[in-house]
Amino acid sequence: MVLLLLIILSMIPIIELKYNSDLYDKIETFNKYCLNNDISLINELDVKNSYMWNMSTYIYDVDNLSNFFYKYTGSTSGTSAATKDYLDLNRDISIIMVNNKYIGNIMKIYNYYLNMSMPLFIFLIIFFGIQMYMYVYFDTFTELKRCLGNCDASCFRYYIYTLFVYILLFIIFFSILLKKLTELYADTDTYEYIMLMKEFDILLKENKTGSAAITDVIKKYSKYKINDISYTTIHNSAVVGELLDIYNSDTTIIYENNNNYKITLKNIDKIEYYNSDEAKDKIKNKVEDIFRFIYVYIVFLIVPLYILSISLQGNYVYLLFVIIFAIIFSISVYNVYNTLQS
């Protein structure tokens, strides 16, 4: 029962990721439908209504983004803006150093899955250790020998082999799924997008004189709460056009801010692309690839369910197959429905 609970807990981040991706996609679709696919009206939607914004803020630790900016010293005028504004996302390590400070990575869903799966991993290792101890001192466990009946130590050894293979398969599966989760960050445009949005957000909230040209354009086209980037209409083509004119007039500017972050709005020319179907499809496809691993989880569930049915000494095998069939059927119908909707 503990194993069943831990496996289900490990599945939750994957299910939530798929659910949120579909939810934000449907919200954006319904918004377009309600506005009759009128581009001019769609452009008036706030950033918080876009799929790209919602998914990016869901998979990243937004509160920690500012720690990834490089810093500059001295005056902003004439400072070179050739290098990047922020640190590259490193999906191979969990702790990095930036600005002489160690910070954790901002891959929120990766960390979420790691934290939810670690108890299962630890439990399996401890459980295997206990079973190995029982095998080594098999003759001293009289109750175990009585329970096994005609099965001796050699029979128990085959059980140890089977358990080892089960744990090894889980470790391999766990490693592959973690790698797939990092691909959601490395192979999509979410990191560049959310960091650019963070730059705009900092400029809006601090409202410095040196960035007035940028913030005035954003405020001009926004309705309310203009001190928060999520409530602006920055995806509006008119806003993008004016912002690009300002940026291209002097690409060497580093905008003044309270913490001396290196803010140059370097990827501002990609705003429209970030909100395009191509950029969004990259995320959706990665989420689909990750969600397919839910079927592997169902295989891992078979073992503890089967053992539980034996332990309860009842005719629960039929219930086992009914539960598995119901899960597979539900997921299949859900996937077919989404395919037809698209």
Image (cartoon, grey):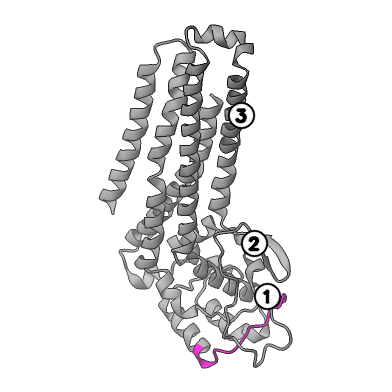
Q: Which residue is mark 1?
A: 206
Closer to the N terminus: mark 1 or mark 3? 3
- What is the span of residues highlighted in magenta in the rendered image? 248-261
Question: Residue visible at 61% across and 12% down?
Answer: 139
Q: Is residue 34 left or right of residue 84?
A: left
Front label number (2 vs 1): 2
- In the rendered image, residue 9, in percent from the top left (x then y), is placed at 53, 36
Q: Is residue 112 left or right of residue 332?
A: right
Q: Which residue is mark 3?
A: 129
Q: How crowded is the residue under tag 3: few (<14 C-alpha within 10 Å), some, or many (20+)?
A: few
The answer to whether 106 is drawn above or below residue 85 in the figure is above
Q: Is residue 22 visible?
A: no
Helix, strand or loop at label 3? It is helix
Mark 2 near mark 1, Cβ–Cβ under 8 Å? no
Q: Nearer the viewer, residue 13 or 298?
A: 298
For the residues labelled 2 and 3, the Cα–Cα distance comes to 39 Å
User: Which quarter of the picture shows residue 309?
Assistant: top left
Closer to the N terminus: mark 2 or mark 3? 2
Q: How crowded is the residue under tag 2: few (<14 C-alpha within 10 Å), some, or many (20+)?
A: few
Badge number at residue 64: 2
Which residue type carries mark 3? Gly
Helix, strand or loop at label 1? It is helix
Q: Is residue 8 left or right of residue 68?
A: left
- In the rendered image, residue 72, in percent from the top left (x then y), is placed at 69, 81
- In the rendered image, residue 276, in percent from the top left (x then y), is placed at 37, 69
